Amino acid sequence: MDLEEKLARLPDHPGVYLMRDAKGEIIYVGKAASLKNRVRSYFRGQHPPRTQVLVSHIADFEYILTDNEVEALILECNLIKEHRPRYNVSLKDDKSYPYIKITTQEQFPRLQITRSLVRDGSRYFGPYTNVGALRETLKILRGLFPVRTCRETPLQHRSRPCLNAHINRCLAPCSGKVNQEAYREAVDNIVLFLEGKHTTLVKELKEQMEAAAGRLEFEKAARLRDQLRAVQEVCERQKLAAASGEDADAVAFAREGEAALGLIFFSRGGKVIGRDHFFLTGTEGLSRGEIMAALLKEYYSRGVEIPPQILLHDEPDDAATIARWLGRLRGGRVELKVPKRGSKLKLLQLVHENAVSLLQEHLLARRRQEEGGKAALMELQQALGLPRLPRRMEAYDISNFQGSSPVGAMAVFVDGRPLTSAYRRFQIKTVKGPNDFASLQEVLSRRFRRAAGQDPRFAELPDFVLIDGGMGQLHAAREVMAAMGVAAIPTFALAKEEELLFREGSPEPVRLPRDSRALQLLQYLRDEVHRFAITYHRQKREKGAYRSVLDDIPGVGPKRKKALLRHFGSVAKIREATLDELMAVEGMNRAVAVRILEGLGRKNNGENPAGSP
């Protein structure tokens, strides 16, 4: 069925549409109150340049019907997150900011730090752009309300609590020292604190303190008094007042050319308690209303806290549908408001001014970085006599510990800046023992073989190759590159300490000035690949440290392994168990229990395996 026929068959119904290019990849996801009208509009009339480019790449489309516009919006957000289409607006952090996570869905919730938001029923607070502020917050929380921070879930009973309980950093629910009601009280107080509802928290702590004193529980009353004082000190440090005493977010964005930046101020209990900013991509040719709508959908679909009121610098497209969607996520009404006068307007003007300032700083820093990177590349080209400017640079390193768990790594710089999405790591497969030369040759062989095989991850060849090491590593690398037909790529080795550059066919190393931008760029590239290799090697070693004979038994995955060790305490105890005792373990079946006995060198005690007559 061609596009015209598919367009003619479109229903007049709410839903989501997915545009695909000639390769079948999803390049755009959108929602519509009427699929018939919205999708047809792309192929009729005049459009902004950005939409024209999108339409020129559409080879096919599909659609999904929904009950209403809100359902369409929910599905649209989910599909955008899953597929990350090229022509949709997306938010990109310049950093991965941490959040405080409280696992409120558990019987005894935990307090954690995380950099990923998962819809698991937990409460997330943040993001914290200032790591120092996050540490200070955690220090206060753990001192005031000592809830558990261990990862154990579900919580297992212990006869003796951990060290945190002994230093008053945990209420020790694992050993029965606190009941669920008292523990939940501490968790609720943490939530109030993180929501910025200090006034409510102060009131509750005062009431609890007075009640404890009235019952002659003076030790508890003294502890509550200390908590109260600490919270009041935090309140005193919070000086920036918001436009009203309500819980609200204030949202604005700034744009200049193709660059755009969104900024959100968080106001809780009448005080601005933090802010967050994002760089927006794919905004070219969009109206301010379209950008604001995309910003709201992208940000609030991440699982962050949604206040009852969101103040906006610009009116978003389809505001009513977005408000209903946000209300569903929050579990209560959400008001989207564009103030025209008064203190709320002044707050939004302040947010917008901050967004403009942040964007200007970012653009200036980017221009300086680009100019510095280009200057360093030109200096490098001149100093080493390179045939062309080394726009794409690749570095390679090998990491192992006395020959164990050897790994290789590749780091990539483009225009003098790291391109982390192109970094690659290699598990050494053919080399036994500590042989960095052979390991390096294996890595380079696989890298350039995949390029010859049109692997899109390795298709682009480098203009410059840097090897972490000396002349020996360089000779090993050049031998492979000559065999693979890529000997024309300039290749150097950078040795540590004296920072000498070795090149093939030259008896004397190149010594670049210590303060030269060219050397600093090479050191940065070398240090990046070394860091990447060390990190991968450490992960492999740590993973290997937790391996046991159970990992080699078919049917015993991480969950069964954990259940077995929790039930018996050690592999030695599992080895002594009978088939019936193994069958008593949670999640165990007869066939796997028999394989465990066999895998541990035991017979099945005369029992017949599953399926035997």
Image (cartoon, rainbow, N blue to C red):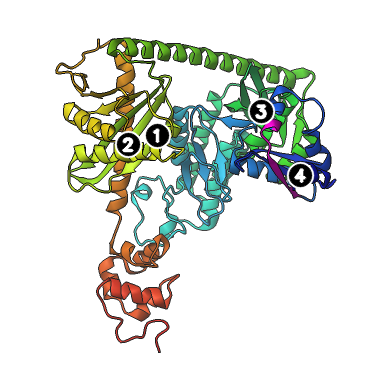
* Residue position for label 2: 409
| Left or right of residue 28, residue 422 in this image | left
Q: Are marks 2 and 1 in contact (CB under 8 Å)?
A: yes
The disc, 2 or 1, on the residue closer to the chain's N-terminal end is: 2
Of 115 and 468, nearer the camera is 468
Q: Which mark is residue 270?
A: 3
Number of other residues with Cα within 10 Å of mark 1, as a class: few under 14, some 14 to 19, many 20 or more: some
How far apart, in angstroms, are the residues tagged by discs 4 and 3? 30 Å
Q: Which mark is residue 423?
A: 1
* Residue position for label 4: 70
Residue pictured at 38% horizontal, 62% vertical: 562
Based on the picture, tell me whether residue 32 belongs to the magenta stretch.
no
Residue pictured at 75% horizontal, 42% vertical: 3
Task: Please report the bounds of the magenta region as a residue range.
Answer: 55-65
Q: Secondary structure at mark 4?
A: helix
Q: Are marks 1 and 3 in contact (CB under 8 Å)?
A: no
Q: Secondary structure at mark 2?
A: strand
